[in-house]
Image (cartoon, helix red, strand yellow):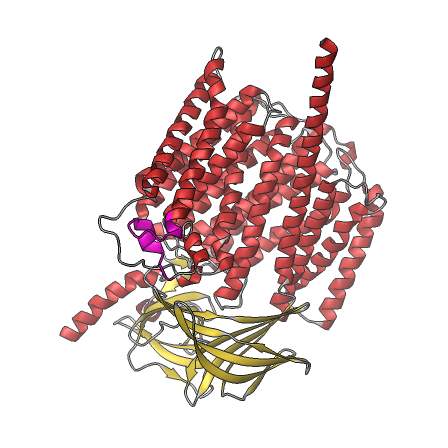
Amino acid sequence: MIAELGLAALWLAAALAGLQLLAGAVGMREGGAALAALVRPAAIVQALLCAIAFGALLLVFARTDLSVALVAKNSHSAKPFIFKLAGAWGNHEGSMLLWVSVMALAGGLIAFLERRLPERTMIATLAAQAFVGLGFYAFLLISSNPFERLPEPAAEGMGLNPLLQDLGLAFHPPTLYFGYVGLSVAFSFAVGALLTRQVTPEFAKVMRPWILGAWIFLTLGITAGSYWAYYELGWGGWWFWDPVENASLMPWLAATALLHSASVLASRDALRAWTIMLGVVAFSMSMIGTFLVRSGILTSVHAFAVDPERGTFILVLLALYIGGALLLFALRASTIAEGERFSVLSREGALVVNNVALSAILGIVLLGTLYPLLTEAFGVRVSVGPPYFNPVGAIFFLPMLVVLAVGPLLRWRRDSFQRITAPVVAIAVVALAVLAGVYFFAGIGLLPLLGMTLAAAVAVASVLPLRGRSLRRLPLPVWGMVIAHFGVAVALFGMAADSAFTRERLVAARVGDTAEVGPWAITLAAVDPVAGPNWTALEARLLASYDGGAVTELAPQARSFWTPPMETSESALRTRWNGQLYTVVGGEAEGGRWQLRLWWKPFVTWIWYGGVLIALGGFLALIGRLSGDLRRRSAQAQIALRRGTALA
Amino acid sequence: MNARLKPKHQRLVLLVIALVILIGAALLAAWALRNQASYFYVPSDIAADPPAPGQAVRLGGMVEEGSLKTRTDGVTVDFVVGDGKARVPVTFAGIVPDLFVEGSGVVAEGSLRPDGTFAATNLLAKHDENYMPRELAEMTEAQKRETISETTE
């Protein structure tokens, strides 16, 4: 019953999206005001219906209703409750329903709240949103119905991939989806502005919170995904340039560029066409990301669903939306008037360079991700990994960091070298000191060396915009920028330190043996069998001591799940402020020995601290922007009220 | 010098810089991809036309029965990967994947040593039915046929 209710709500929502599109398309013309008035209510009701549909899915998973095919395939009655719920979106159909629901929710929010843009632009935006939504409704209802019933209820569910039975991972895909959907809203705004030729600073201000929100979610999603891969896969790496990782990185790169160019448009009325273009590119990257992940077209540890039909469907949607948007852009770009001009040496100039560098990195990642597909068409199998991405990406990433350090010191419109000589020299001195220090004392590879140097430079430069300003009266968005840029430095330092100073030991140890890795001495105290709700494991008890200090205990496990049958290794970590000890236990070697893999990873945690700081910066900026909008709105309401009483 | 340029020229300068950077990025990426992509080999490919020693490649095949040996250090394994036509000796130091056993498929990432052995830095074995390296999924089918034809001969 609940499943049917969910399905009905989904069909109704799809019908409303159709109504929203039609009413919007007609309502934009002269004399269509009656129909245009339907658009906002349609968006709001559609959001409610999607919420009902998603609630229904959660409910069937919570009750483990095994007559629903999706539940039988992805859940199990013996699974912990939180993972039953997470199972609702931990699969293809459920995750697409989540996508559609979040998108409808975003559309409903805009329809309910947003009143700043001309009404025609809003109608066009909501129609574009409905157009994008319709494609996903069709995808869900035609090829991936999450509410499909089994002819006979299954006796027991098939379980959830044990790798996915992890709290962090339960919330990882939704986070990314919020990001993708936020970019779809930015895309709709861009299309709406193009259709009505209203590419104004006001439009950028309305679009910006959505970009910021999407960007915060993507940042958090990527950070969390990286940490998950780090501790769950047991390989000790934090970024593998896996296609699915790239699928989340590419929208982030585009969103980062869009965020900065929208800022220029909002405060300086420049970069109009470029901002629209980036809006299209950012959503394209979300779609490509979804396509790569959902079609299973690339070999990947994440590509669980291998289904060419669905891949084709998403590819058609991709071609339709992106091709359509690019065509619209090509037709309308010439009618977008040139914005305000600025000198090359100005804040805008630096942001243009930042945008170009981000686009270059985006292109490099995109080419590297798609190259294996391209060569396979010619019958050649290749895989592209760190030897390509790291150096080629760095060629553009490292110079971009130099611009990141200097850019915020520049004034809008026009500036001179003389004015910023003092801070630039200070930054350069710090960078050179770190470069010399690290070079002479550590003797590390070129990329980590440059990474550390630039991390120091960016760290110093990121707080320089604070000098000479009253910290108490500094606007929140400026705090956001400072913290986010500082986070970049922190993350970069973590990456460089990890790749330069990691120590690794691989030993076969008897109980009682001690192995050393970096400053740690680790003793294998015991190996015991243990059992969990749906797994059994061998657990090693390790006693570790840092530099002869107090002993702490770690318990890495080699786990065997039985629904479905699968082996995983659960790493055990010990975190210090200056790094992490990472331990994995493997199989039994001959002579009663146990394989242990031990890493000492100095400052590796700073990578994720940096990621969190970057997201925090975005969050502060978002709060600052939204509270500014609210203040303006209530001020306007008061003015209107006063006028009203004056008239009466 | 930029301060003296007219605003219109400034815009042009930025546009040219942007184009140069983007085209440069595309060319660089194309060049690097040709050189850095790691190619997939089966043992008979390696016998026919071996990759340069040290070049990163992927080697896929079946772990031969009876070839898997662990050295006395307890963590280094030697085994032979074959495809029915050729055989390549492989060494790997590390914790092997759980489903890595003799007679099953494996994809080894690494490079060829000058002495003709393959030094693997990573082993990918079949994890579960939902995930396996795609080369492996197809190869095991071909391998099954090979094995059947060999044993029936």
Is A60 or A122 nearer to us in this picture? Answer: A60
Is A396 or A300 nearer to us in this picture? Answer: A300
| Position in image of residue A488 (x %, y %) | 66, 53
| Position in image of residue A390 (x %, y %) | 56, 58
Image side of residue A595 versus residue A193, left or right:
left
Split into 4 quadrants, where in the image is the N terminus of chain B? Answer: top right
Question: Is A535 part of what is drawn in magenta?
Answer: no
* Above or below B100: residue A300: above
Residue B153 is at least partly visible in this image:
no
| Position in image of residue A443 (x %, y %) | 68, 71
Split into 4 quadrants, where in the image is the C terminus of chain B? Answer: bottom left
- Residue A426 quadrant: bottom right
Residue A264 is at least partly visible in this image:
yes
Image side of residue A611 versus residue B93, left or right:
right
Which residue is painted at 42% across and 65% down in the image?
A: B57
* Above or below A523: residue B122: above
Question: Is A68 part of what is drawn in magenta?
Answer: yes
* Above or below B53: residue A35: above
* Above or below A186: residue A542: below
- Residue B10 quadrant: top right
Which residue is painted at 34% across and 50% down in the image?
A: A377
Residue placed furthest toward the left: B153
Q: How many marks?
A: 0
Magenta stretch?
A60-78
| Position in image of residue A388 (x %, y %) | 51, 57
- Residue B71 quadrant: bottom left
